[in-house]
Image (spheres, rainbow, N blue to C red):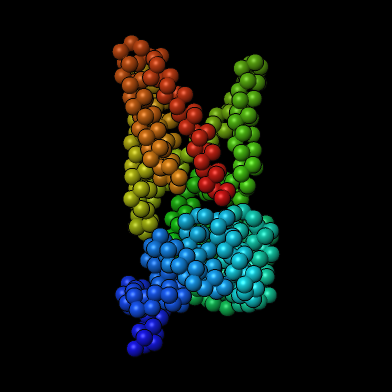
Amino acid sequence: MHDQLLQRAILLMQQKKYREAQTILSGLLAQDPQNPDILSMFCEVKIQLDDFRSAMELANHAIGIAPADDRLFYQRARIYLQQEEYNLAEQDLSHAIALEPYDADYFALYAMMQNSRKRFEQALQLSEQALEIDPENIYALNARSTALLKLNRKEESFAGIEGAFRHDPDNAYTHANYGWGLLEKGSPKDALQHFREALRIDPNLQLAQAGMMEALKARYWVYRIFLRFAFFMGNLTAKYQWGVILGLYAATRGLNYLANHNPTLRPYVMPVVIILVVFAFSTWIITPLSNLFLRFNPYGKHLLDENEITASNHVAISLLVGVTGIVSYLLTGLDPWMLVAVVGITMMIPLSVRQLPSRNPRMVNIYTIGLGVAGVLGIAMAFMEQTYNIFAGAYVIGIVVFQWVVNYMSIKQNNR
């Protein structure tokens, strides 16, 4: 009976009926709580159900019983990756490989993690080690292709993806990975086809869902420019990302100084300053604004989650306030309307980044609300004949500080 139930649980897992498998495994575990195989299977079910806390407890218990079982360390590494604990995942993968140096899946996962950490040379080496063990390992082929693409070896990268398609033409992950490669190459239409195919095979694949959303938005040429910049920045490590940000800031300040002290150069310099400022500002707001347009797409509207919809709504309202301020100022010439325009336009920045992943989202929300309150009070006092008031000053300082803090948080999040 025990073996029959175990085989039944395995069959249910293969059919992705994880809740039914969970019921069987729970009963088996109650009868044999020290069985590492049952613990490992139950852990896998919890991972598939996104219950990572329970999965971690099961993995730790299994490792305590069978500390020489390499599969358990590989399994726990996957949980650590879901929790973005990359250093701990790396330790477990290294240990799994030390226990079993001939399992291609271990090297493939390690390579995929190194790609996420922007260690592309190490990712390439690990993926090639995996392919030496198993030349048809799909995840190793994909990891190698991604590493080659990031190392600007595009022809080799796409050749590797084609190899993955030959081995498994109906693999959803390969289609999604190829789609992202095409997107980075600048071919959103072709990318869209592969994301659509990936979602046909696996409708819940988040990599394909995110890619589909980016490909749909990339139909607009403004967003394509932003996307190229995003890929460029995303491939840089933290110090180079800061170098680009500080370089843009220094260039803007330097050109502005040059324009102010050389009237003859001002007509030539100021347009460049304006372009740089507009570009920097657009990088903050383009995602929620493009999500707003995506909501009118019959397919795209189903890809947005609640947070993305809320952020796009808030940014649209803020933009409307800013435009109202500009129009009213042009019609009346009253300075308080210019403050309305400034607050409306600049509040798009904090409202747009509330959906970004953060270790402390509550603090970001509190800061955003505080900025909004300061802006409203500053406008109210401006209309009471106090255009330059303490709340307006606090708002300006707060919005400047906010940009630097969020840049720091974003770069830290993307360089784990």
The residue closer to the viewer here, 31 or 122, is 31
Residue drawn at (36%, 24%), measured in percent from left and top?
Answer: 374
Q: Residue at x 63, y 47 (%)?
A: 237
Considering the image in quadrants, where does the N terminus appear? bottom left
| 397 relative to 71, above or below | above
In the image, residue 249 above or below residue 200: above
Q: Position of residue 88 (x, y in %)?
A: 55, 57
**Count of numbered marks:** 0
The reply to whether residue 200 is in sight is: no
Q: Nearer the viewer, residue 218 or 24?
A: 24
Residue 395, x across and y down, in percent: 42, 24
Q: Which residue appears at 45% of the width and 67% of the height?
A: 61
Q: Is residue 98 above or below residue 291?
A: below
- Left or right? Give the position of 375 relative to 257: left
With 37 as the anchor, is 372 left or right in this view?
left
Residue 158 falls left or right of residue 289: right
- Please state which of residues 11 and 32 is positioned toward the viewer in this rendering: 32
Residue in front for this viewpoint, 91 or 358: 91
Q: Is residue 378 visible?
A: yes
Residue at the top extreme, as displayed: 385
Residue at the (65%, 57%) spot, across then down: 120
Q: Which of the 4 image quadrants contains residue 319?
A: top left
Place of residue 3 in the rendered image (x, y in percent of width and height, measured from the top left): 39, 87
Coordinates of residue 376 in the picture (x, y in percent): 33, 24
